[in-house]
Amino acid sequence: MPNLESCFTLFSQPVVHISLPEKFTFPFYYQPQALAVAAAEQLQQALEKQTDIIGSESDSGKMLGVLVVKNAQQQLGYLSAFSGQLEYNHTAINFVPPVSDMQLQDDTFLAENRIINNINAEIEQLECGEPLTTATNALNEATNRYQQALSVQQRLIVANRQERKKQRDEAVEQLTVDGFEQLKLVLAGQSIYEKKQLQALKQHGQSKLALLQQALDTITSKIAKLKKQRKARSKNLQKKLFSQYQFLNADGATKDLNAIFAELPEHIPPAGAGDCAAPKLLQYAYLHNLAPVTMAEFWWGAAPKSAIRQHKNYYPSCYSKCQPILGHMLQGLDVDDNPLLINPAHGKDLAIVYQDDDLLVVNKPAEFLSVPGKTIADSVYMRIKNQFPQASGPLIVHRLDMSTSGLLIIALNKRAHKALQKQFIERTIEKRYVALVSGNVVADSGTIELPLRLDFDDKPRQMVCYQHGKPALTTWRVLERKNNTTRLHLFPKTGRTHQLRVHCAHQDGLNMPIVGDDHYGLKAQRLHLHAEYLSLQHPINHQALVFEVAADF
């Protein structure tokens, strides 16, 4: 493990003019404090001299973090860390070490890992080998031949049955009673013979298929047995590995990953838990009696293909891996309040643009929930429910992001709700947004089609995913270019969460985040996105309705 001197870095420029924060950073929603910015910029200067640390421009970048600390001599300095692993173990930058290096140095772990890798190789050899292919093909071909032969025989039986019926019908008037009875016996014998033929065909075919299935089962059962062994060994090895990730907090209490995640519904830590920058930084500080002051994490390098990350932008700690760990590690520190628990709608009015007995159209302010959240009830839904107690049904027909302002339709009864919902499903309602994006959009108009899904590691952010994402389509048109920003009209043809924000910010979209987008760009006074136009049919009298409210930016 590196010593204190190798990881504690003094500021290269004086920081005495920067005030110390009163509380430690709330890592899941923050604006970096001036000391953290100074530390990050000093680290970035060092990174620019070591271009081979993160990789080439074609590779995805990496999340890095800085933790400003105070040592025993009351000197201010900072620690640096990266999330995950680096290709280069030795760099001129003194990153703090991983919380556990068991994966790299423990002989027992490495030996067990080799066994698992050998099992993987054996499984792959069996699954891709010729015996499995041959056995599968032989069973499939035999099954097809059997089904075809069975079908031919069954059709023949049906045809012969119809022919025998025809013979009986014709013979009733042509033959004597004894002759007719004799014919019936002959025809019955033919029927019995055909049934025996069918039975023999089934017995022979099923017997042959059973032998082929047995040959296939011999291979697949061996694969299943190996997979069961792998699962058991991996689970035990994983549990042992997780036990090596021991995390301190400011009170001096220690918990490993197993204990931290045991309290959650999923119980098992996700891959990479404990290897993010923030836990590494705090663990090193606690181990070396360094007092945490403030922290920040930023992205360095090329953006990944799916999630939106911009070079040098600051980002919060991830939820799936870091929230449980940091929930333990921050105990004992005086941490900033969670701003997400503060009602953003406090003191804001909800203006009604249109009202009749069946629907409302409101102009929702920015930073105002459409529906109640987990911790905040105040929302468009609650305001309307209180103001119109006679209203029935779900009320909310569609939603706007909390940070997005603009026109929102409310149904005041179930019949109106159903009719309006139908219009949204059939996409007959026209919607237009106005947005201000950072940068000069070159083309005058265009289309963006990027499928979206929730980023489970970084909720509530969305990510582009061609495998599991839902289709999302946006068209756009430039209104004005001014001061390195572009004013746009955006026309969402689908209604995915954060669709317009992601389509603007993603490298395969406009590659220019909306001004004030604290999820996918840089925070400003507000998110410059406004739902300014709606065109729809009245849900009851079918009258055409058009609403337009200009943005206040």
Image (spheres, rainbow, N blue to C red):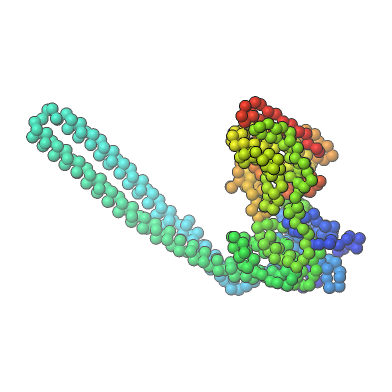
Where is residue 330? Give x, y as percent. 73, 65
Question: In front: 161, or 84?
Answer: 161
User: Measuring 55% from the left and 66% from the top, which residue is drawn there?
Assistant: 235
Residue at the extreme front: 390
Question: What is the quadrant of residue 19 in the picture?
Answer: bottom right
Q: Is residue 405 above or below residue 330?
A: above
Where is residue 538? Give x, y as percent. 64, 29
Question: What is the quadrant of residue 395 in the picture?
Answer: top right
Q: Please count the marks in the image.
A: 0
User: Measuring 81% from the left and 62% from the top, which residue is drawn there?
Assistant: 23
Let me know if residue 357 appears in the view.
Answer: yes
User: Measuring 33% from the left and 56% from the top, which residue is drawn there?
Assistant: 211
In the picture, measured across the screen, residue 143 lies left or right of residue 112, that is left
* Quadrant of the image containing the C terminus: top right
Let me know if residue 50 appears in the view.
Answer: no
Question: In front: 249, or 58?
Answer: 249
Where is residue 275? Give x, y as percent. 68, 63
* Quadrant of the image containing the N terminus: bottom right
Question: In front: 53, or 494?
Answer: 494
In the picture, measured across the screen, residue 315 lies left or right of residue 221, that is right
User: Measuring 80% from the left and 34% from the top, which residue is drawn there?
Assistant: 480
Where is residue 427? Give x, y as percent. 62, 33
